[in-house]
Amino acid sequence: MCDNLKTGVERPDLYDPLINPAYGELAAHYGTLIDPARARKPKDKPRIERPMPYIRDSFFAGREFTSLAQMQAEAIRWSTQVYGVHKHRGLDGQTPASVFAAIERDALMALPPRVFESVIYSIGRVAADCHVKSGKALYSVPWRLIGQQVTARTAGDVVQIFHSGTVVATHVLHLAGRSTNVEHYPPHKIAHTLRTVTWCRTQAEQIGPGAVAVVAELSTVNAIHRLRAIQGIIRLREVRRSPTGRGLHSSTAGRGPRLSHRQRHPGRRHRSRPCLARRRPATTGDAART
């Protein structure tokens, strides 16, 4: 039985409270039941609230401990030899030790074989690039979920992405950057990213029938082994041949021949460097006349 704090209860409700998923996993791991108390109703759990001041005043008050181990040993001794043998009106005059031995001891379950691993949940919306943010990293999800709200669960070194309670993606934890699975992209995006044979055939159709014939012949047998050669053929469309025989990238295609400054500005008066060098230096008389 807990209060309605956000780390335990996300939405309080008398009949159907929404439990924090991480807190719910902790309870399921240890086989316990979460039963939140009503808001502003402290009498719903008096046996939980009342022992706190008694423990504070009877055990901690006036004591000093030199280490955690000493405090734990003293707490066990106080629980069994002092508090455990004290008669309680709430137990019809019985002691906690006798009630525990008679009823509760045999009903206790053994602890799980492994320690609970804390988890972190976050909610995000899938962006147009098929990624959702969790922490400071981006993780890819199937492209059909673009615009949908998903939940990321981080446990240890694994990040799982859920949609409608179903795992749709699993990634290794990243502290920053991107974790991308190309299979999460649409089919046409995958082909463009990987530049497969199918993508090369599509690009060859845009070049012309000659390129289609060459790519088709190379991809007939052992297409994977000839993929690099096919990609090189597709790459040729981005290169044009100059008159000198040197390859120029497409960034220079269509610009025309290079022109000198005099050719680009035929209406201006131009002085060449030799002409400037032949100019007669000014004499003293010339300087006086000026």
Image (cartoon, rainbow, N blue to C red):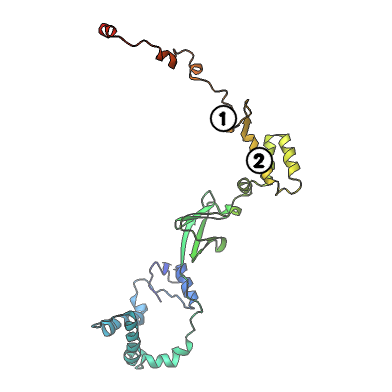
Estimate the x, y position of residue 99 in percent, counting from the top left.
Answer: 40, 91
Residue 114 falls left or right of residue 55: right
Q: Amino acid at mark 2?
A: Gly
Estimate the x, y position of residue 4 in percent, counting from the top left.
Answer: 38, 70
Q: Residue at x 63, y 31 (%)?
A: 240
Estimate the x, y position of residue 227 in percent, counting from the top left.
Answer: 68, 46
Decide if residue 271 is in sight here.
Answer: no
- Does dot 2 land on a helix, a strand or a loop? helix
Residue 5: image tag: none
The residue nearer to you, when weighing 104 against 68, is 68
**Relative to 69, residue 98 above or below:** below
**Relative to 8, residue 71 above or below:** below
Q: CA distance from mark 2 to mark 1?
A: 20 Å
Q: Which residue is mark 1?
A: 252
**Relative to 156, residue 259 above or below:** above
Q: Amino acid at mark 1?
A: Thr
Residue 232: image tag: 2
Q: Residue at x 28, y 84 (%)?
A: 59
Quadrant placement of the C terminus:
top left
Q: Residue at x 28, y 80 (%)?
A: 66
Residue 104 falls left or right of residue 147: left
Quadrant placement of the N terminus:
bottom left
Q: Earlier in the sequence, mark 2 or mark 1?
A: 2
Structural crowding at the residue carrying mark 1, measured as other residues with C-alpha within 10 Å and reported as few (<14), some (14–19) or many (≥20): few
